[in-house]
Image: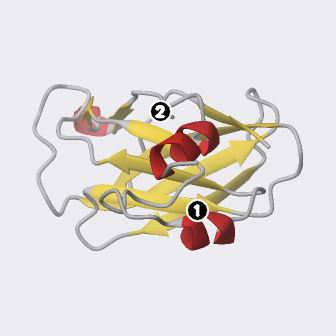
Amino acid sequence: MSYSARKSSIHVAIILIAALVLAGCQGGGGSDSSSGVTDLPGDDGGQDNSQETASLASDSAVLSWEAPGYRVNGDTLKDGHISHYVVSWGQDPENLSRSTEVTCQDCQAMEHKVEELDEGTWYFTVQTVDQDGLTSPEADLATKKI
């Protein structure tokens, strides 16, 4: 089986496009940024990565997203103004029972691996936290079935 066929068969069916927004006094921040969940490591330029793919546990998900560029009120969210992100997940879309802070240096193109997921459907979201502690509403949910 070719790499692209393996990638297609393993790749999570749902990749969502979400707007990360930063809310708070002055309108928080948000923009057209993308967010997704996948079960494969990053693109390897078309090389055979069967060992790398095999090493990724079937009970994990890799979330990736880009930093928002604008606040809710339309103001630009400048580089360096993002403190960190909060990734939340759970099996009930109305009650994401687990979360973690994802620290970052430049906070632009981000990725976080969630491991030890039980069988079933999992829901994920991301929030942006700025340097003043203002936290965005949750991005649209991404899902993965284990």
The residue carrying mark 2 is 139
At horizontal 69% and vertical 45% (from top left) the residue drawn is 89
Which amino acid type is shown beneath numbered disc 2? Ala
- Viewer-proximal residue, 81 or 143? 143
At horizontal 26% and vertical 38% (from top left) the residue drawn is 29
Confirm whether residue 22 shows in the render.
yes
The residue carrying mark 1 is 113
On screen, residue 70 versus residue 125, left or right, reads: left
| Residue 142 at x, y percent in the picture | 58, 33
| Residue 52 at x, y percent in the picture | 56, 71
Q: In the figure, 52 relative to 35: above or below?
A: below
Q: CA distance from mark 1 to mark 2?
A: 17 Å
- Viewer-proximal residue, 82 or 4? 4
Confirm whether residue 134 shows in the render.
no
On screen, residue 73 versus residue 38, left or right, reads: left
- Viewer-proximal residue, 60 or 66? 60
Q: Residues within 10 Å of mark 2 (few under 14, many from 20)?
A: many
